[in-house]
């Protein structure tokens, strides 16, 4: 199989797997856009509205509405920059962090249940593949 075929299979598999696991997100009662924005805020730390809009690939008015909704639910709060009073950052509240951590725990638990059906050799191969996927993504290594 050439690199393009591997990339195509990996892309499809990742999308299908995430779609299956996304069913666990229904318990959080947040729309996908709100959940995605909250995830960026939780994992990126306090982030400016413009950086958040860029990360979510939406325009500033759209992200402002999402943040207003998340604020009203007590999941995020706005904080002022220490160096420039005109700049505001969005930070996750304890409630927002807890909600996202619970959602991640549900998705990981569901995936772990499904992994139990694999043979030890398949599990080892998948663990190695996960390491390679992290390397490709540029994401920090999991702890």
Image: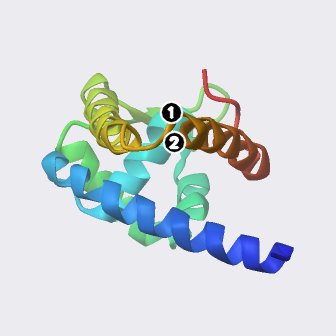
Note whether residue 3 is visible: yes
- Indicate the position of residue 12 as horizontal and vertical percent values: 55, 74
Q: Is residue 107 left or right of residue 11?
A: left
Is the residue under label 1 in contact with that under label 2 (CB below 8 Å)? yes
User: Residue 54's spot in the image, x, y percent?
Assistant: 61, 63
x 74%, y 71%: residue = 6
| Whether residue 46 is visible | no
Q: Which residue is located at x 73 percent, y 71 percent?
A: 7
Side (left or right) of 68 relative to 134 = left
* Circle 2 residue: 88
Q: In the rendered image of this protein, does residue 38 appear above or below residue 53?
A: above
**Secondary structure at numbered mark 2:** strand
Q: Circle 1 sits on which residue?
A: 80
SS at badge 1:
strand
Asked if 44 appears above or below 48 in the picture, the reply is above
Q: How many marks?
A: 2
């Amino acid at each position: 199989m050439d690199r393009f075929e591997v990339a195509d299979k990996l892309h499809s598999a990742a999308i299908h797997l995430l779609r299956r696991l996304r069913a666990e997100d229904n318990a959080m009662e947040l729309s996908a856009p709100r959940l995605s924005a909250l995830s960026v805020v939780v994992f990126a730390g306090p982030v400016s509205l413009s950086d958040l809009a860029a990360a979510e690939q939406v325009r500033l008015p759209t992200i402002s509405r999402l943040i207003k909704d998340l604020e009203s639910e007590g999941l995020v709060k706005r904080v002022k920059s220490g160096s420039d009073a005109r700049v505001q950052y969005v930070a996750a509240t304890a409630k927002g962090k807890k909600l996202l951590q619970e959602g991640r725990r549900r998705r990981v638990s569901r995936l772990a249940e499904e992994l139990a059906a694999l043979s030890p050799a398949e599990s080892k191969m998948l663990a190695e593949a996960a390491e390679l996927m992290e390397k490709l993504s540029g994401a920090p290594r999991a702890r």
